[in-house]
Structures are given as structure tokens and as C-alpha cells.
Image (cartoon, rainbow, N blue to C red):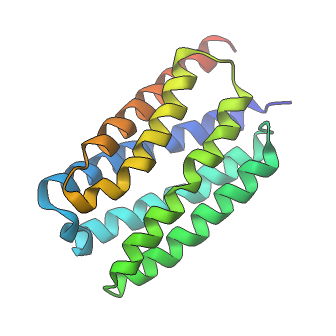
Amino acid sequence: MLALANLKKGIYTSVVAAVAILALLVQLEIFGIGYAFSLPAKLQMLAIWLLAIPATFFYWKSGLSARDLFRVASTLAVVITLVGLVLLFAGSFVGIELIVLGYIFEPIAGTSIFLSLSRTLWNYMFIVGAWTYTLGLPLYLYDFGYVSIVGDFVKLVGLVKLLSEINANR
């Protein structure tokens, strides 16, 4: 059974992370991929990573469908992005590559959330936005981060509307 209180806490945390991610994506588009090596960008990425801890915890406790998929994908995402952050703080471009690799597991984990909720427009916006955001990340190497920006915005709108929908159906 889906524990709505924990699911809502996870979604609230994901909304905060999506806003922080959106801000960082816009900055990376304006200043270029080299901005990722600046202290403000590194601190933003660290804050976003820290938000993954409570979000993952709440989603784990919410009784999602495809729970094992979520647990494996979210664990891989958190661990790989942590290694990427360590390398990024050390000045290695491999850190950025690992962060992008780790983020591939975000929409995989999000699929479990998608499968746990009714198939509404907002749920589809969430999962399509998550995949678009993630698959668009490598385009920053070509100074074309707009795909990720749009994807993250769509994901954010989907998450906010999912919260409204969950609150209305309580």
C-alpha cells in the first residue's frame, strides 16, 4: 500500500531539488560548461546531492510499485553522483561525466513513482520531463542545454501538479 505521507514528503523534496537544478541548468547555459568548476556551481551541486538523501529515504518508505527498481536505481544514482562530486571538487572533468552518468538513474528510479500513481497528465509530465532533462544533459558539451532546461521545467510542473492532485484526493 502506498504511504501517501512519505510520498508527499519525497515529492516536496524533489520539487525543491528541481528548482535548484533548474537554476543551475540556466547558469550552465549562460556561462558554459566550465562554470561547473566554479565554487558556486560546485556548492549548488552538493546541495542538490544532499537533497537526494531525504528524497530517497521518503520514497523508500512510501511503498512504491517496482520498489526494487527504485532502490537499485536510486542507490546507483546517489553513489555515482557522489563519486562524481568528489572528482569535480578535485578539478577533474571525469567528475562531470560521472554526475551525468549518475543522473541517468534518476528517471529510472522515477519510473517506480510513475508506476505507483494514476496515469494523469501530471504524472506523464513528470516522467517525460525527467527523461528529457536527463537525456539532454550531454548537450551541454555542445552549448545546447535548452533540452535539459525544458525537461526539468516540465518535470517540475508535473511534480507540483501531482502534489496538488494527491492533496485533493486525500
Residue 4: quarter of image: top right
3 horizontally vs 109: left or right = right
Q: Quadrant of the C terminus?
A: top right
The residue located at (70%, 39%) in the rendering is: 112
Extreme right residue here? 1
> Where is the N terminus found, in terms of image quarters?
top right
Q: Is residue 14 left or right of residue 40?
A: right
Pick whichever, 32 or 86, lies toward us.
32
Q: Quadrant of residue 111?
A: top right
Q: Is residue 87 above or below residue 137?
A: below
Q: How many marks?
A: 0
Q: Name the residue nearer the viewer: 4 or 41.
A: 41
In this view of the protein, can residue 162 be seen by the observer?
no
Q: Residue at x 21, y 73 (%)?
A: 38
State which quadrant residue 45 falls in. bottom left
Left or right: 85, with 76 as reference point: left
Front residue of this view, candidates 61 and 142? 142
Q: Can you give x and y, in whole percent of width and height, for residue 24 in the image?
A: 28, 54
Residue 156 position within the rendered picture, expressed as x and y whole percent measured from the top left: 42, 33
Residue 68: x and y in percent read 81, 51
Residue 140 position (above or below residue 7): below
x, y percentage for residue 48?
Answer: 43, 58
Name the outermost residue toward the top: 168
Horizontal side, residue 64 vs residue 10: left or right: right
Q: Up-down: is 126 above or below 23? A: above
Tell me, yes or no, if residue 43 can be seen here.
Answer: yes
Residue drawn at point x = 19 percent, y = 68 percent: 35
